[in-house]
Amino acid sequence: MEIKKYKKLKDNRYKIIFTTEEEIVLYDDIILKYNLLLTKKIEKAKLEEIIKENEALACYYKALKYLAVKNRSKKEIQNYLNRFDYAKNDIERTISKLEKQNLINEDNYIKAYINDQILFSMHGPDKIKNKLLELGLPKEKILVSLEKISPEIWQEKLQKIVSKRVTINRKDSQRKLKEKILYYCLNEGYKKEDINDALNKIDFPQDNDILEKEADKLYKKLMRKYSDNDLLYQLKMKLIVKGFTYEEVEKIITKYKINP
C-alpha cells in the first residue's frame, strides 16, 4: 500500500491516507520507528504489524492519561482499560511497563490514600482498609501502613465526630443519641471500644429541654388524630421510643394531664 498524505491530529497522532483512500491513525512514535515519513510504500503484512503495535501504544497512552488525573491502583487501571476493549496482552504489558516506571506502586498508593482519607474525610481505619481492599491492594501492606498511624489521630477524629453530633442534636434523648453515634461511628470504620471511650469523654446535655420541646411538638401533631387518654398514650409511647426514660416521660405527661 502507498501513502498519499498525512494529516496532523491531536495527542501526537497522525491520520495516514493511502492512495486507495483507506485511512489509519498512528502515533508519531510509530511513524518515526518505522520511518514512514520516508518509506511511502508498506507491505500489507508490515502494516498489520504496525497497526497492532499502535494499538498497544494507544493502550499505554490511555493509561497515562488516566493516571494524570490522580494516582490509581493496578486494579483501577486494569478495569479502566478493559472498558476500551484493548487486547489482554496489551493491558498486561501496559501494567508491567507502568510498574517498571514506578507509576504504579502499591506502597506509595496505600500511604497516599491513607493520608488523604485522614486529611479530607472522617473515615476510620476499618473503612479505609476495606476501601483499599476493594481497590485490589494487599491486606498485609494495608495493615502495616495503618499500624504506623498514631492512635491519637483516630481518637481526635472520633472526638470531632461525637462533639459535632451532640452539638447538632435537637430531638434525641441522651440514650438514643449515644446509640445513633455508636452506630454511625461503627459504620465509619472505628472500633467499638474507641467509640465508647470518646462518648465517655463528652458532657451530654440533660434531656429535660429536649424532652419538653419534643413532647410539645408531638402533642400538637398527635392531637389532630387522637384525644384524651388515647392522645396521652400515643404521646407516651412515641417519647419512650425516642429513648427517654419511663420516669421522665411520666413526669412530662403530667403537664398535659393538667393542661389538656
Image (tube, helix red, strand yellow):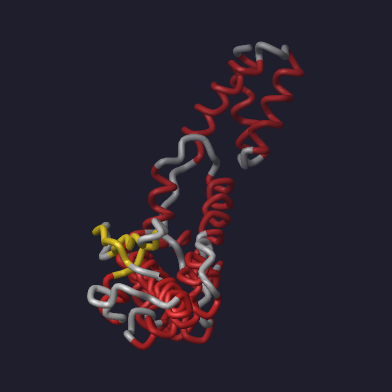
Taking the image as shown, residue 65 lies to the left or right of residue 75, namely left
Residue 191 drawn at (x, y percent)? 53, 69
In the picture, the quarter occupied by the N terminus is bottom left
Q: Tell me, yes or no, if residue 190 can be seen here.
A: no
Taking the image as shown, residue 31 lies to the left or right of residue 81, namely left
Which residue is drawn at the image coordinates 50% and 81% (left, top)? 92
Foreground of the two, 151 or 203: 151
Residue 236 drawn at (x, y percent)? 68, 29
When the figure is inspected, residue 41 is found, relative to residue 173, above or below; the finding is below
Which residue is drawn at the image coordinates 53% and 54% (left, top)? 184
In the picture, the quarter occupied by the C terminus is top right
Taking the image as shown, residue 92 lies to the left or right of residue 116, namely right
Q: Tell me, yes or no, if residue 110 can be seen here.
A: yes
Residue 11 drawn at (x, y percent)? 27, 62
Taking the image as shown, residue 223 lies to the left or right of residue 123, namely right
Foreground of the two, 144 or 32: 32
Residue 162 drawn at (x, y percent)? 43, 54
| Residue 41 falls in image quadrant | bottom left
Which residue is drawn at the image coordinates 50% and 73% (left, top)? 75
Foreground of the two, 198 or 10: 10
